[in-house]
Image (cartoon, grey):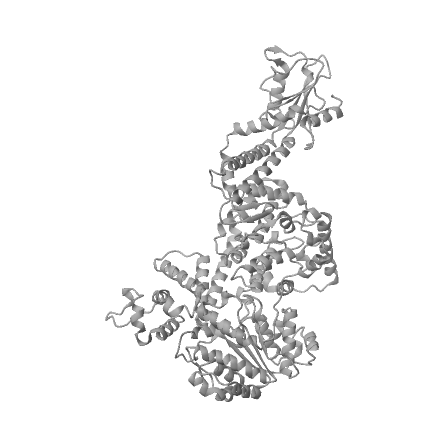
Amino acid sequence: NKGLKPFVEREMLAKYGARWRYEAVKSLRDHHLTEDGQDIHLDTQALLLIIWDQWQLAFQNVLGHAERSLVSELRTTRNKWAHQEAFSTDDAYRALDSIQRLLTAVSAAQEASEVERQKQELLRIRFEEQARNESRKVAVAPIEGKPTMGLRPWREIVTPQPDVASGRYQLAEFAADLAQVHKGVGSDEYRVPRDFFQRTFLTNGLRKLLAGALQRLDGSGGDPIVDLQTNFGGGKTHSLLALYHLFSGVPISDLVGIEPVLDEAGITRPALAQRAVLVGYELSPGQPRTKPDGCVVNTLWGELAWQLLGRDGFALVAESDRQGVSPGSEVLRELFTAAAPCLILIDEWVVYARQLYGVSGLPGGSFDANLSFAQSLTEAAKASPQTLVVATIPASDAETGGEGGREAAVRLKNIFGRIESPWRPADAEEGFEIVRRRLFQPISQPSLFTARDSVVKTFMDLYRSQPQEFPGDCREAEYERRIKAAYPIHPELFDRLYNDWSSIEKFQRTRGVLRLMAAVVHTLWERQDASLLILPANVPIDESRVQFELTRYMEDNWVPVIEKDVDGPHSLPLRIDRDNPNLGRYSACRRVARTIYLGSAPNSRNPNKGLTEGQVKLGCVQPGESVATFGDALRRLSDQATHLYLDGQRYWYATQPSVTRLAQDRATQLDEEKVLEEVEKRLRVEQGNRGDFARVHVCPTSGADIADDETSVRLIILKPHLTHALRDQNSKAKEAANEMMSLRGNTRRGYRNTLVFLAADRNRLEDLKQGVRQFLAWDSINQDSETLNLDAFQRSQARTKRDEANKSVDARIPETYTWLIVPEQPDPRQPDELQEFKLQPQPLNSLAVNASRRLKSEDLL
C-alpha cells in the first residue's frame, strides 16, 4: 500500500478534486468505510478496486494496457490470498513480479526495490529446495552423446565465469540499472568501472557512441544529443552505464579495452565530467525531494541543476522549479557552461512524463511544461560546446504504457529527432560476443585455441560431407567463422534465441538471453556435460530454473506440454529413448524434442512456424553420430507426441493437442485381428514375385492347397503370428512347418523337402504391428476427415502421416520376415531336420528373391 496509495490519491485528486473520496466510495465495499461513514480505509483491495473501476476516467492516460492487466491479475491474487488458497513458488514469484512492475510504473522506486529483494529471496529458497530435491527424486537420465573420439568437450576448453559455474549469480545482476549505479549500490559488474568494462563487449554502435562522447566533452567535435531509441531489451541502459563510467575520472587502466576508442576519437584520456542522471521510475512528479544541503527539488530541471552544480546550480532554476514551469534554453545554457564538461543521462523519460498527462497541480509541473523543458534542454545542449545529452525513448508499445505514454513518446521523439545523432544497437552477431563474454572466461592457452579449432573444423566437415541432411548456409566459410565467434555455444542456439525468443514482447533481447543461458551453462557444468558444443539439443529443459526462464513470458501454459511431450522424468521422448537402445545411446528423441521446442514455441501462432528436418538435425547432431538416428527419432516422435505438429516439412509444438492424439487413441483401440489382416493383405503382393521358386504361398491356413511333387520348390510365407527366434525350442513357425510338411489335407505328404518356409522374427513383429496400427489409424482419420470436421491443415497432416506410415510398414515387412526354415536330411536313414537361416533385409527386392539368393548361397536351391 505504501507505494500505490500516494499514486491513487494523487490521480483521483487530479480528476475529482476535493470530492475524490466520494467518487472512490462508489468502487469500494462496505468494510472499506469507517464506522461513521465519513472516511475510507485504503487497503490493497480498495486501491486495486479504485484503479480498476476508475480506469477510463482517472488512470488510462497514465497507465497502459499492460498495467491494467497487472491490476486485474493482482486483484485475483489478492482474493486467493484472502481465501487462504495455497500458492506455488511459481505463483508467488509471478505475484511479486507483477507487484514490482506495477510499483515501477507508478514511480514507487523504493517499494519496487524492496519487492525485487523479496523476489530474489524467493528464488534463492526455490533453487535451494530444487537442489535438495534433485538428490531425492528419480533423476532424469543425462543426455547421452557419441561424438567423434579425440575431440575435447567444451568444458575442457572454456570455463564459465565463477558466479555462473557455481550458480551464485542473481538473475537481477543481468539487469543493468543506471539509478542503482548512480547511488553506488548494485553488483560490482555494473557498479565498478573496471569490472564493467572487463565484461563489456564494445559493439560497433557502442564504440561510435563512446568515441562521439569523448570528442563532444573534449570540445573537439561530436554530437550534442543522442537518442538511444531501440526495442525492449536493446542495450540502452548498458550504453548509458558505459558513458557514466567513461567520464567518472577513474584511471584509464580501469577502462579495460577503451584504448581503440580513444584512438578513434583522437583523445588521450576522457574528460572528468559533471554527471547528471535522471531515471524516470526513480523520480515521482508528485513527491518533492529534499537534498542533503536542504534544497527541496520538485522538477526534472531542478534535479538536473542540483546534480550538476549542487546548491549553486539549483539557484539558477529555483524559481522555475517552484512554479513548475520550464526554464528557458538561455538559463540551461548558463548552467551547462558553468558545469562544463557535463554529461546528462536520461533513462525512462516516458515513465515520468506519462504520469503528468491530463493532470495539473503536481510539484513536477504539467505535461506540457516538461515537454517544453525537453525542447529547451536540446537547444541549450546544442549551444554548449562541452555538453552531451543522452536519452532513452522507447520504440516499442510495451514500454510506453497508456495514452499518456504514447503521447509522451511521440512528442519526445519529435523533439529529439530534429537534433539527435543516430545510434545503432548491438546486432545478433555482436550479441553472441556480449553473452559469451559475460558467461565464460576468455581462452588464454594456445593449445586450447587449437582444440577449439579442431572441434569447429570437424563440425564443418560433417555439414559439408552430408549436405542433404543440413541447411545450405551451414556449409559456407562464414558459418565456420560464426561457430568460432560463438564458441562454445552453437550459432543455431543463438539464432533461435535472438530471432525467435526475442520476438516475445517481454523477453528482453540480450538480458533475456543472458538469464536463460546462465541457467543453461550452470546446469550443464554441474551435470558434467561432455558435448562438443552447446547446441539447442543440450538445453536442459527438464531443469526447473531453465524451464522457468523458457516459460515465464509465454502467454500460454507450456509447462504441461513440456512435461508430457518435450522433457522430464515422465516425458514421452525419454520413454521412447529408454525403449529403443538405438535411440537411447544418443538420447535422440529428447534432443530432437528440445530442439523443436526451442525453435517453435515462441512462434507457434505465426504463419511460418516450426523447423525443417534439416534445422532439427542442425540443432542435434554432433560429429561422429549417426544423422539417420535423429531422423528416426523425429518420425517416432511425430507419430506419438500429442502436441507435436507436422505440416509438409516443418515441425512445431503447440499447446493445443494435434490430430496425433486421435490417431494414438484409434491405434490403441484396433483389434489384433484387424492388424494381422492388414499384414497378410500386404504379404499377398509377394505372390507375383516368385524369385527362383515354382510358387509362393502366402499365409496358408494348412498344407491342403500346397502341391506335393518332386519337381518344384515352393516358398510358404507363414502367417505373421507364427514367429521364430534364434534357436527357439518353442517356435510356432517350426510347429506350423512340421505340420504342413507332414500332411496335405488328410494325406501324408511324400516330398517334404520341396517346401521352404519364411517366418516373422518374434522380436521384430511388434514393430511391424505398431507400424500397421499407425497406418490404419491415420487412414481412418483421413477417410473420416469430413465427419471429424478437420480443417485444411489437419487434413493435410492426416494425409502426410498416413503416407509416412504406409512407407514405414512397407519397410518393416522385410525387416520382420527374416527367418528361412528349411528341411534337410543329411542321413537318408534319419528323419529330416529343420534348419534356420537369417536373411539380411533387402527392401528393394521381394521376399522370394531374398530367400532364393540365400538358399543358393547355401547350395540348397
The part of the image, by quadrant, that contains residue 7 is bottom left
Return the residue nearer the eye: 724 or 760.
760
Q: Is residue 595 left or right of residue 94?
A: right
Name which residue lies at 49% across and 45% down. Answer: 657
Toward the left, the furthest residue is: 36
Q: In this rendering, is residue 362 above or below 41?
A: below
Residue 726 visible in the picture? yes
Location of residue 412 with respect to 574 vertically, above or below: below
Query: Percent position (x, y) of residue 391?
Result: 55, 75
* Quadrant placement of the N terminus: bottom left
Q: Say whether residue 724 is visible.
A: no
On the image, the x and y values in percent for residue 503 come to 55, 59
Residue under the image location 47 percent in, 67 percent down: 116
Tell me: 823 left or right of 415. right
Among the 4 quarters of the image, the one containing residue 756: top right
Residue 843 image point, x, y percent: 68, 33
